[in-house]
Structure formats: C-alpha cells, structure tokens
Image: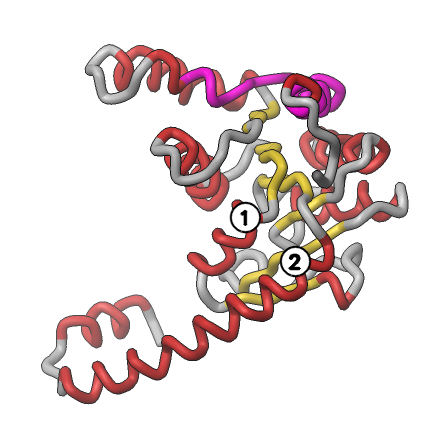
Amino acid sequence: MTNEDKIKQAFEDRDWNEIKTHDSWVIFKVMAEFVEGFEKMAKIGPCVSIFGSARTKPDHEYYKMAEEIAAKLVRHGYGVITGGGPGIMEAGNKGAQKQQGKSVGLNIELPHEQGNNMYIDPDKLISFDYFFVRKVMFVKYSQGFVIMPGGFGTLDEMFEAITLIQTNKIGKFPIVLVGRKFWSGLFDWIKGTMLEEGNISPKDLDLISIVDTPTEAVTVIDEFYSKYLLTPNF
C-alpha cells in the first residue's frame, strides 16, 4: 500500500462500529507484547540503552564509539539494550558481545532497518509491532540512556525520556548525548529559544550531559550511580 493509498483510506467513509470491534481486539495484541516484554526483560534486569542512527556504517567514527561505549559499560558491570537493528544499534550489541556481557535487542520493523543484527542472542531479542510498547521497555529497564547521533527516531526516544523525568513520571536517570558537534546546534536553539521563551526551566537542562568520548559517557553514568550509592544492575 502506497502512502497515497493510506491517506485516502484514512479519510474514506467507514463503518465505525466495525472499526470499534477491530480496535477492541487490538488490545489483546498490545497486552501480549507487554507480557512478553516484561517476562523476558525481568530475567535480564536493568541495562543502559544505546540509541542512534540505523544508517551509520561500521567504518564511521560514531559506530566505533558506540561499540567502545558498550564494551566499557559491560566492563563496568552494566548490560546493554539497543533497538536490535543495524547501525549504532549493531555497534552497541557488538561491543557488549565482545566483552561477553548482557546484550538485548528490542526490535521493530521499519523501512530503513528491517531485521535484527547478528550480535544478539535469539533469547535476548524481542520484536514489537507497537512503538509505544517498545518505548515502555526501554524506559522501564534502563539505568541510563546513551544517545549517539541519529535521526527522528533517536530524537523521539531522547525527548520522551527527558519529558518523563521532567514531569516526575519516572525517576531520574542519566541521559548522555555523545558528539558535541552533532548536538550543539540543537541545544543552542533549546537554550536560546525554548528557555528564553520560558517554555522550559533552567534546571531542565541539567537532565542532559553532552560529551565527546566513550570514557566521558561511561563516567557520567558511573558518577550518577556513585552519587546515590547504587551499583550497576541494581
């Protein structure tokens, strides 16, 4: 089905009673995804989620940095969660696997990143049809977010986590953005426009750390948990 067909279908006349019945059955599929996710993730425990572009190639510096970050996290006692696909996600699972650490993939079929990468054990791969169920798994079982350069999906995950912490819907955990050159323009706008307009508070900016190296990224997470006298996979 083309995008034009989808638009036409969304606005055509329809039997809303029939749609209501269909939507009611969708609830059970959503429930099934939550149950599978909770059961599998509960056995693995909290990890650090690594986000970034699925289009990043293995020879790119960001891929190599994500792989190194994942390896360092494992050596420091953390597990790693990714979206299970190629690019930065693959780098995260690869780095964790090399250190024989826990590594999870929360996969979803998308136009540019279909299929899971080869660095996830089959029993640690969970596939989702619904973005919102997948997001719950990322947040519920994350001890921190490491966010590499990426596209709209990466921004979506980042801002969702910031919003949930800002509104006290979840407890605070470290959100680390890697690559000052990539992220500086966005956060210059946030400070110069959103903050100046009064749409966020100055303290909201404290929810985010921007770093340039794998060592800095892992240090931010370690220092956060040392401050609260917690340990990896608490």
Q: Quadrant of residue 173?
A: top right
Front-most of residues 213 and 86: 213
The magenta segment is 205-225
Which quadrant of the rendered structure holds the C terminus? top right
Q: Is residue 192 visible?
A: yes
Q: In the rendering, at what x and y percent does residue 138 appear?
A: 56, 48
Relative to 17, is 157 on the left or the right?
right
Marking on residue 149: none
Q: Earlier in the sequence, mark 1 or mark 2?
A: 2
Front-most of residues 115 and 70: 70
From this view, report whether residue 102 is shown above or below residue 203.
Answer: below
**Most distant residue in the left direction:** 13
Which quadrant of the rendered structure holds the N terminus? bottom left
Q: Are marks 1 and 2 in contact (CB under 8 Å)?
A: yes
Q: In the rendering, at what x and y percent does residue 191 appear?
A: 34, 13
Asked whether residue 206 is drawn in magenta, I would say yes
Q: Is residue 213 visible?
A: no
From this view, report whether residue 191 is shown above or below residue 104.
Answer: above
Q: Main secondary structure of the magenta part?
A: helix
Q: In the rendering, at what x and y percent does residue 190 appear?
A: 34, 19
Marking on residue 140: 1
Asked whether residue 223 is drawn in magenta, I would say yes
Relative to 97, is 178 on the left or the right?
left
Residue drawn 45% across the image and 77% down it: 29
Q: Residues within 10 Å of mark 2 (few under 14, many from 20)?
A: many
Mark 2 — residue? 41
Residue drawn 60% across the image and 60% down it: 107
Amino acid tagged 2: Met
